[in-house]
Image (spheres, rainbow, N blue to C red):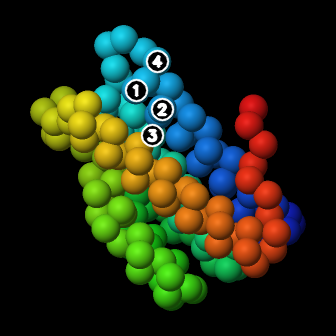
Amino acid sequence: MNDKNDDTIAKEWLRYADNDLIVAKHSFHDLHPKQTEIACYLSQQCAEKSLKSILVHHNTEPPRTHDLIALCEMCIKQDNDFIALRENCKILTAYGVHVRYPNELAVDEGITKIAIDQAQLVYDFCISKIDKSNKLEKPEKL
């Protein structure tokens, strides 16, 4: 893929995913009014980058797509355990594009909380998979 070790690159993908999740939570829990659209978008981004870290970990160049279902299917080809994330990916995929534009997709606080929770599950699952195979530690917080 490039000069860096694949696990170093995977860890970078996870660091970016973690940053997206941190900001999603902050924009929802700490800002008033709650920034539901951006929190949903960043939740999708967290899941996308988490899944792409798995592909990199398995020496596969991640495609330029926001389609979490397609990314999940690629991960399933590497590890059948990713079947467990299909529903999470279905829930989050729409937030990659539609919440960034007016009148595309309405979200409320309940939906946003679900999006953040789903992103956390995808992120934690990916961390655990990489950690099991390489003892890769969770990326450091900034």
Do callouts 4 and 1 mark residues in contact (Cβ within 8 Å)? yes
Do callouts 3 and 4 mark residues in contact (Cβ within 8 Å)? no
- Element at label 3: helix
Mark 3 vs mark 1, foreground winner is 1
Do callouts 2 and 4 mark residues in contact (Cβ within 8 Å)? yes
- Element at label 4: loop
Image vertical order of residue 31 relative to residue 103, above or below: above
The tag earlier along the polypeptide, 2 or 4, is 2
Image vertical order of residue 84 relative to residue 142, above or below: below
- Element at label 2: helix
**Residue sticking out furthest to the top:** 32
- Element at label 1: helix
The disc placed on residue 30 is: 4
Do callouts 1 and 2 mark residues in contact (Cβ within 8 Å)? yes
Report, in whole angstroms, how far the alpha carbon at label 3 lies from the one at label 1: 11 Å
Amino acid type, callout 1: Phe
Read off the residue under disc 3. 42
Amino acid type, callout 2: Lys
